[in-house]
Amino acid sequence: MIELILLERVEKLGQMGQVVKVKPGYARNWLLPQKKALRATKENLAYFEAQRVQLEATNLQRRSEASEIAAKLEGLTVVLVRQAGESGQLYGSVSARDLAEAVSEAGFTIEKRQVILDRPIKSIGLHLVRVVLHPEVSVTITANVAQSAEEAAMQARGLDPLRAAEEDEEAYAEGAVGAAAADAGEAAPQ
């Protein structure tokens, strides 16, 4: 285990300024290259204490900016049109990059690494997605995945487009059977 000083809050690890023990690979491959931590040496501890006020001020400014953006972004719904089978299963999936592009088209600049997906979206419907704007600020948006803009509008109103399509087919089939029976009934008396 390696001891590190955190330079910012890291989810599920600790707050800024904490000295934490992590596995060498996590430190070497993620925390140190991303400049989220420093090795806990005497020199680095002294450097951190000297820079602590500046780091906290910078963090506070970035957090307040992220909070302002979060207030505007909260409740945003983005529409993603994708091809899907009859059961609503997508041909492919919706990734973090797709969601980041859709949010950017809506007028907010975010990166794909800020979009947190537990698993790829592989079905039609409304999906809640978390966007992390700052280590201490996250917001939830809705991804409306549909086969067309009309289906997306139906989903936004709370209707299930797959069920509506099935009902239309049943009504059509009943209408066709009724019309065929009416045709047969008209043909019989003559």
Image (cartoon, grey):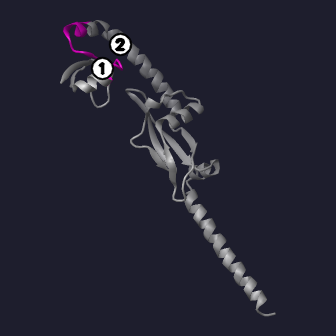
Find out whether residue 189 is within the magenta segment: no
Answer left or right for 110 relative to 29: right
User: Pointer 2: what residue?
Assistant: 55
| Magenta stretch in the rendered image | 30-46
2 with respect to 6 (left or right): left
Question: On the rendered structure, is 149 left or right of 84?
Answer: right
Residue found at the very far bottom of the displayed protein: 189
Q: Residue at x 43, y 17 (%)?
A: 61
Disc 1 is placed on an element classified as loop
**Farthest residue in the left direction?**
1
Q: Amino acid at mark 1?
A: Met
Eyeballing the image, is 126 above or below 141? Answer: below
Give the distance between the C-alpha atoms of the residues marked 2 and 1, in whole angstroms: 9 Å
In the rendered image, which residue does mark 1 sit on? 16
Evaluate if marks 2 and 1 touch, with contact meaning CB atoms under 8 Å apart.
yes
Question: Which residue is depicted at the point 48% across and 30% down?
Answer: 70
Query: In front here: 7 or 180?
Result: 180
Residue 133 percent location from the top left of the image: 44, 28
